Amino acid sequence: MKRKGILYPVAVVAAAVALGLLLTREPAPPPREDAAAERADYFFEGFTTTTYREDGQLRGVLHGDRAYHYPDRGELEVETPMMEVISDRGDLWLSSAPFGLAREAEGTLLLTEEVVIQRPATAARPRLTVETRDLLMDTREGVATSDAPSRAYDPGGIVSSRGLTIHFHDDRIELHDNARGRYEAP
């Protein structure tokens, strides 16, 4: 008999606690109105896009494994982008990174994380490799900048600096701060 007397009050208290939790629980927040803005309206897989200068010359080619377009932000998020730029001399520059963010209205491509820029060897010049992080490319002007530690090397030597600017069309690199180099004599 004592068991019945103990179980009944415990059951009543448990039911009251459960009912209290149900009645005082906050309702789920309504969906954000701007949630649709965060949805991609289309995507690419294994894509290539080509842009030209006003005079009809090739400006650049962007390749990527996958990309998502966000119309309200005017951005294209790109997985493993590789950008090809042709200099005025006809030299090819290849820039790649794990992730990129293209802004169409600004004409920019931000390559993030470990960025590698290469100018393949030609008959006149050896291969050049540049390593940095977070490189902002102005795709209209053919200029890219980074404030991160950077290093550039070819078979003859290596230079490092804090930040750089690459002028792709002019085949020129500017080192910003703390530039240091080491070269091998031929």
Image: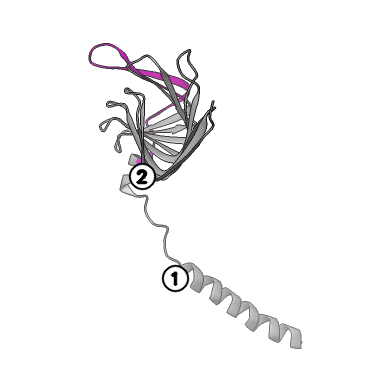
The secondary structure type at the circle numbered 1 is: helix
Amino acid under label 2? Ala
102 and 138: which is toward the camera: 138
Residue at 70% x, 86% y is 5
Compared to residue 98, the image places residue 8 above or below, namely below
In the rendered image, residue 121, in percent from the top left (x then y), is placed at 50, 18
Please report whichever mark, 1 or 2, sits nearer to the chain's N-terminal start: 1
77 and 122: which is toward the camera: 122
For residue 61, what is the image quadrant? top left
**Does residue 10 appear in this view?**
yes
- The residue where tag 1 is placed is 24
Checking the image for residue 35, the label placed there is: 2
Give the number of the mark in front: 1 or 2.
2
Disc 1: CA contacts within 10 A as few (<14), some (14-19) or many (>=20): few
Check if residue 132 falls in the magenta segment: no
Query: Viewed as shown, does residue 169 lie left or right of 84?
Result: left
Q: Quadrant of the C terminus?
A: top right
The secondary structure type at the circle numbered 2 is: helix
Query: Viewed as shown, does residue 78 lie left or right of 156?
Result: left
